[in-house]
Amino acid sequence: MTISGSKNQHVRRKDDQKESLQSRSLQLLNLYRLIIASLLFSFNFISISFIGRIEPSQLFFFLSAFYLIYSFSALIVSVNKLLKLSTQVHINILFDVIVISLFTLNAGGIDSGWGTLILAPIAGASLLLPGKTALLFASYGTVGLILQEVYGDFTDAISNTSYTQSGILGIALFATAFLAISLAKRVTESTTLAEKRGIDLANLSQLNNHLINRIESGIIVVDEDNSIKLMNRAAAQLLGIRQSTHNIQLGDTSRELLELHSNWQKKDPTLGEQDFFEIERKNLSSLRARITWVRMTLTILFTHNEELQMKKVQQGFTLIELMIVVAIIGILAAVALPAYQDYTNRAKMSEVIGFAAAAKTAVSECLISSGDPTDCDTNAEVGLDTATNISSDYVSQLAVTTGGQIRVTVTGTGVTGLDTSVLAYTPAAGANGISWTCGTPTAANYKYLPQNCRNASS
């Protein structure tokens, strides 16, 4: 599997986990709604003084029964995932707002305290669908509570209306939504960081396996029971076995390595890396092995074929060849880096020249229509904005001066002598119209300008 394939698989797994977590959260919110609805319905059969004005009304009975039926249905829909999560949340919130507003109206208005029941559904929904949607949920609740006060005021259903308390409760709903947005943002950032680290670990594992298999020396990682946990391709080739670590003991690959490792374990393994040990094998070339202690349960054996290693060494570069290569790279860097820097600075100056081109058109039109250069020697006379308002990352200002001359002040290039310098365009009327002469007073800046601008100017 490639690193990119591992990354895509990890991302898909994280998406599935996120969707599953949201689904469970919605189910818990629906279970909370069902419990509240069951309690409200039970109040129809027991005497509770704070329900309604005096006792449960017929409206209260129908509302609580309908709320209970809906809550049970919403839980069934969320468990079986019959609708999209966002659709379920929107429908549930609208239903909660309507029902709780009617409960509040039946109980005598916002003073009864029933309106606070909307806080929990708004908070839960805001966590499920954070951002602007959370603010929309808060506005649903606020509008519902205010409308029931308005209705109670006009129909005398509420004896003492309190718009102030409705507004305060609405502010509380929006505060809840903002808090949910902040919490959701932090959760998202933490989840993103965890996903990134998970991807990095997966990529690092892939890279680690790739690098270990590319190493020419054989590497075998064994535990305290002499069970092989990792073996690279070179070790498998040296031992003449297939590269697999599934249920393989060190003794199954090489009795000589097992004996060497067992003798080494009898000593103090924490002393660190040991010297090479010679291993003689019948009908096979000899091996050299070195054992390194990693942690309490793992050790590493390095093996290599001495004859093959000598051949590899003889195939390497000589010192003089390496020195020649380094010298060539140094010469190329000394030539290429300054040329690249000049190229980037010329690219910056192209923006300066582009600003001047637009101003040239305005000045040319003024000179042609007026015929008098003194009528075209300010930005306002040629129809341009003030000098300091014509700016960019590399232009601090563009000013039209005496005779229609355009002066563009350079900035932000990071080149000493080029910043704060002026690129001047001087017009001249002729038989063929207006011609322009481009120049700058500093000759050292010519290399950053096109050929037609490499002229001295005041």
Image (cartoon, grey):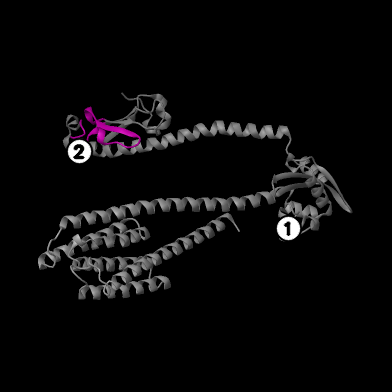
Q: Is-magenta flag for residue 347?
A: no
Q: Is-magenta flag for residue 378?
A: yes
Query: Considering only vertical position in the picture, is 272 above or below 169?
Result: above
Query: Label 2 neighbourhood size at 10 Å, few (<14), some (14-19), many (20+)?
Result: some
Q: Amino acid at mark 2?
A: Gly
Query: Relative to the observer, which residue lies in front, 208 or 62?
Result: 62
Please, what secondary structure does the residue beneath circle 1 have? Answer: loop
User: Percent from the top left, x then y, of residue 260?
Assistant: 82, 48
The residue pinned by badge 2 equals 383
User: Label 2 vs label 1: CA separation?
Assistant: 79 Å
Quarter of image, res 248? bottom right
User: Percent from the top left, x then y, of residue 176?
Assistant: 30, 54
Quarter of image, res 31? bottom left
User: Percent from the top left, x then y, of residue 249?
Assistant: 76, 57
Q: Which residues are magenta?
A: 377-405
Count of numbered circles on the image:
2
Specify the quadrant that holds the N terminus: bottom right
Query: Considering only vertical position in the picture, is 198 above or below 30?
Result: above
User: Percent from the top left, x then y, of residue 317?
Assistant: 73, 38
Horizontal side of 426 relative to 371 (left or right) equals right
Query: Considering only vertical position in the picture, is 120 above or below 319?
Result: below
Specify the quadrant that holds the C terminus: top left
Q: Which mark is residue 107?
A: none
Query: Relative to the observer, which residue lies in front, 434 or 299?
Result: 299
Residue 194 can be seen in this image: yes
The residue pinned by badge 1 equals 243
